[in-house]
Image (cartoon, grey):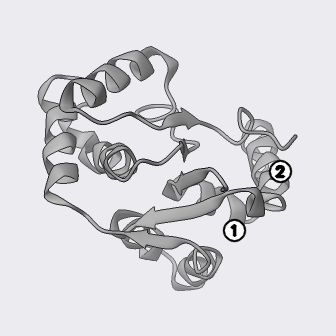
Amino acid sequence: MKPKLYIETSIVSYLTAYPSRDLVRAAHQQVTHDWWSVREQFDLYISQYVIDEASAGDRNAATKRLAALRAATLLTITPGAVSLAGELVRVGDLPRKAIVDAFHIAVAAVHGMDYLLSWNCKHIANGTLRGRIESTCRSYGVEPPTICTPIELAAE
């Protein structure tokens, strides 16, 4: 059985974006491309939040992002996920402005994902927040996914 992996929107954004002139962003894009080439090692999942975010902005870019997501399974937004997202904000793990980020985490946790893959290092793949997020998920009664970037989830 393959590990279950939730793809947060920043992954598909880096995957389909024009190459950046910023060296760090360009490196992240390359790592994302490298990881994407071995994605079949995982069962891929997304939520409606990913679709909504990927659909925004430039029409051509959105079309590319959505095409890349076609192979992923769509997870439902359950009442438990809504409640957990609210709890992640209420207890201060994430600021109110990051409610969609809380929903990504909550949907992944409630559906038992093994991993949540993200380049959002401000509110999701953030080492200083990870312990608090995990604690809140566990106190809510669900095991949190391992939150990581493609660098941390390199192919073996």
Question: Is 38 located above or below residue 55 in the figure?
Answer: above
Residue indicated by mark 1? 16
| Left or right of 106, for residue 72 | right
Q: Label 1 amino acid?
A: Thr
Q: Which is nearer the eye, 82 or 42?
A: 42
Residue depicted at 35% across the width and 45% down the height:
101
Question: Is 72 located above or below residue 91 in the figure?
Answer: below
Residue depicted at 34% across the width and 26% down the height:
133
SS for dot 2: helix
N-terminal label among 1 and 2: 1
Residue depicted at 47% across the width and 38% down the height:
145
Q: Is residue 77 visible?
A: yes
Q: Label 2 amino acid?
A: Gln
State the image quarter where residue 75 is shown: bottom left
Q: Which is nearer the eye, 37 or 32?
A: 37
SS for dot 1: helix
- On the image, the x and y values in percent for residue 79 come to 13, 57
Tell me the quarter of the image containing the N terminus.
Answer: bottom right
| Left or right of 104, for residue 24 | right
Tell me the quarter of the image containing the C terminus.
Answer: top right
Q: How many discs mark residues in the rendered view?
A: 2
Residue depicted at 85% across the width and 53% down the height:
34
Q: CA distance from mark 1 to mark 2?
A: 11 Å
- On the image, the x and y values in percent for residue 151 come to 75, 36
Residue indicated by mark 2? 30
Mark 2 neighbour class, 10 Å CA radius: few under 14, some 14 to 19, many 20 or more:
some
Mark 1 neighbour class, 10 Å CA radius: few under 14, some 14 to 19, many 20 or more:
some
